[in-house]
Amino acid sequence: MRSVICGANGTMGKLLQQRLEKDIVGLVSVDGLNGVPRTFAELGDVAPEMVFDFSHHTAIFDVTDYAVKNRCGLVVATTGHTEEEKAAIYAAAKTVPVFYAGNMSLGIAVLCSLAKQTAQSFPDADIEIVEIHHNRKVDAPSGTAKMLFEAIKEARPHATANCGRSGEGKRQPGEVGISALRMGNIVGIHEVHITTASQQITLRHEAFDRGMFADGAAKAGVFLQGKPAGLYNMTDLLEEN
């Protein structure tokens, strides 16, 4: 799988390089450090089969243009995309296979499935999502928290998100609270609390090593090989496995 990594000089880009090794035919990083090209244009023609994006969500227009131009698969491992940026991802998926997930962890995919199942089993329960990350994370709530909310919304189509609850006003029917905490060097903790008047179920996933995201991205690339154009996610990967 001839692979290009965008965001190659970042922490995740370096971890992914360790996973892909001999499959790498090109690296791109906007900082240009270590002799890595700053742009895809500087990279030249390397005939990629797969592009992995571990850069920044604002780079998605260049990333999708490159994937479409080269007719290769695309694994989007960045989060925090605006609606306009998401539109670029969806547009690319009409031409090439695109893997897009708010979290590249297989464990989080299982957590989303369990959250949906539990929300279905307790239709009247209050649901709260709590996500905790290191103090350098920029976007809040996390892409994973949004994934969890969307999974719950599949079971409760009329659910609404209340991000960062504050001020007066009691909880509204169908409301799902989402809280974000930023502290220390925590890789990532996500909890879903499903609570009725008589009992509570708490689902929790904790990441110990960022390498799991690189592992998930590498598996996503393998999954995309030979797939037709379309938008894929962790649920698709789990179902195939």
Image (cartoon, helix red, strand yellow):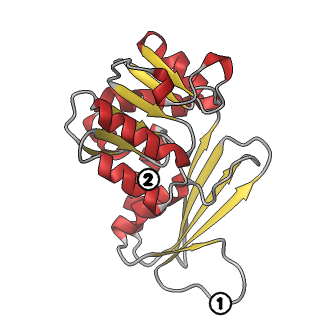
Q: Answer above or below: position of 225 versus 200.
A: above
Q: CA distance from mark 2 to mark 1?
A: 29 Å
- Front-lying residue, 72 or 176: 72
Residue 87 left/right relative to 131: left
Q: Position of residue 218 (x, y in %)?
A: 43, 27
Decide which of tag 2 and tag 1 comes sooner along the chain. Answer: 2
Q: Answer above or below: position of 77 versus 211.
A: below
Q: Residue at x 76, y 41 (%)?
A: 185
Q: Residue at x 37, y 49 (%)?
A: 89
Q: Answer above or below: position of 69 versus 179.
A: above
Question: Mark 1: which amino acid?
Answer: Gly
Q: Position of residue 140 (x, y in %)?
A: 63, 59
The residue labelled by disc 1 is 169
Secondary element at image label 2: helix
Question: Mark 2: which amino acid?
Answer: Cys
The residue labelled by disc 2 is 112
Residue 233 visible in the displayed image: yes
Residue 72 visible in the displayed image: no
Locate the C terminus by quadrant.
top left
Secondary element at image label 1: loop
Locate the N terminus by quadrant.
top left
- Front-lying residue, 163 or 172: 163
